Image (tube, grey):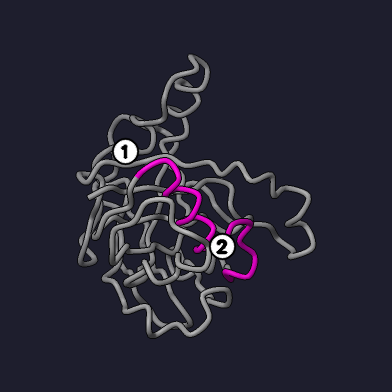
């Protein structure tokens, strides 16, 4: 199973899209050991002083494919979840300063908490899905997939040019353009899709 993620994939207003849509998507990966499932609490990593959260919808691939067309891409989605893409920002800054990869900043244990997956049939319009994040009961991020720079089909088509997407692979699809920020030990995170609570855990 591969865990892939796309960076910088949302705008605040739909009219901003074309100015930033270059066709070059930012794709990175996380190891399977970064996953935390079933609303289990997440251990705050001891090596960082600046942990950042980003709420994201997550695609689960239902059938394998390579060089998938835009038209065929939605048929490769089996289900959706909501997750948190954690970044150890201080570690990331060190990696970037040395022009190194992001693995340590993005792929540590607990860097990818996700909810259970819901069948794609529950979502008649992939380009109109609302999701949000509350921390300690306060809403921090809200998003709608209409504001994605690259929609789910485009992510799948682009990524499959470079690597075969296999059944069971998951893809974090990007976070809303506003509201991402720092998380602290003891914080409670609750992520919602269409107003329904899907993900609920604490940093311990």
- In this rendering, the answer to whether 185 lies above or below 91 is below
Q: Residues within 10 Å of mark 2 (few under 14, many from 20)?
A: some
Going by the image, does 86 lie left or right of 117?
right
- In this rendering, the answer to whether 49 lies above or below 135 is above
Tell me, yes or no, whether the two marked residues, 2 and 1, touch with CB atoms within 8 Å.
Answer: no
Report x, y in % for residue 166.
27, 54
Comparing 65 with 198, the one in front is 65
Mark in the foreground, 2 or 1: 2
Report x, y in % for residue 133.
47, 66
Comparing 163 with 28, the one in front is 163
- In this rendering, the answer to whether 49 lies above or below 193 is above
Q: Which residues make up the magenta segment?
A: 144-163
- In this rendering, the answer to whether 34 lies above or below 155 is above
Q: Quadrant of residue 172?
A: bottom left
Q: Quadrant of residue 149?
A: bottom right
Residue at 68% x, 57% y is 11
Report x, y in % for residue 118.
31, 77
Report x, y in % for residue 123.
44, 82
At mark 2, the secondary structure is loop
Q: Give the residue at mark 2.
A: 151
Residue 84 on the magenta span: no
Q: Earlier in the sequence, mark 2 or mark 1?
A: 1
Q: Give me the C-alpha separation between circle 2 and circle 1.
A: 24 Å
Residue 146 on the magenta span: yes
At mark 1, the secondary structure is loop
Q: Residues within 10 Å of mark 1 (few under 14, many from 20)?
A: many
Q: Which mark is residue 107?
A: 1
Tag count: 2
Residue at 63% x, 55% y is 177
Q: Which mark is residue 64?
A: none
Comparing 162 with 90, the one in front is 162
Residue at 50% x, 49% y is 158
């Amino acid at each position: 199973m591969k865990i892939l993620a796309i960076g910088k994939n949302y705008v605040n207003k739909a009219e901003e899209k074309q100015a930033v849509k270059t066709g070059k998507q930012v794709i990175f990966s996380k190891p399977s050991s970064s996953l935390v499932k079933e609303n289990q609490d997440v251990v705050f990593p001891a090596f960082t002083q600046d942990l950042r959260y980003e709420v994201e919808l997550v695609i689960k691939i239902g059938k394998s494919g390579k060089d998938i067309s835009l038209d065929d891409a939605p048929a490769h989605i089996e289900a959706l979840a909501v997750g948190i893409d954690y970044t150890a920002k201080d570690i990331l800054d060190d990696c970037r300063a040395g022009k190194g990869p992001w693995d340590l900043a993005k792929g540590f244990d607990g860097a990818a908490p996700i909810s259970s997956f819901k069948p794609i049939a529950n979502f008649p319009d992939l380009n109109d899905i609302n999701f949000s994040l509350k921390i300690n009961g306060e809403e921090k991020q809200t998003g709608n997939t209409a504001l994605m720079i690259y929609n789910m089909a485009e992510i799948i088509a682009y990524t499959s040019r470079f690597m075969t997407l296999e059944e069971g692979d998951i893809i974090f699809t990007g976070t809303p353009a506003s509201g991402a920020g720092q998380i602290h030990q003891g914080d409670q995170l609750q992520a919602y899709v269409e107003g329904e609570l899907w993900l609920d855990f604490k940093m311990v």
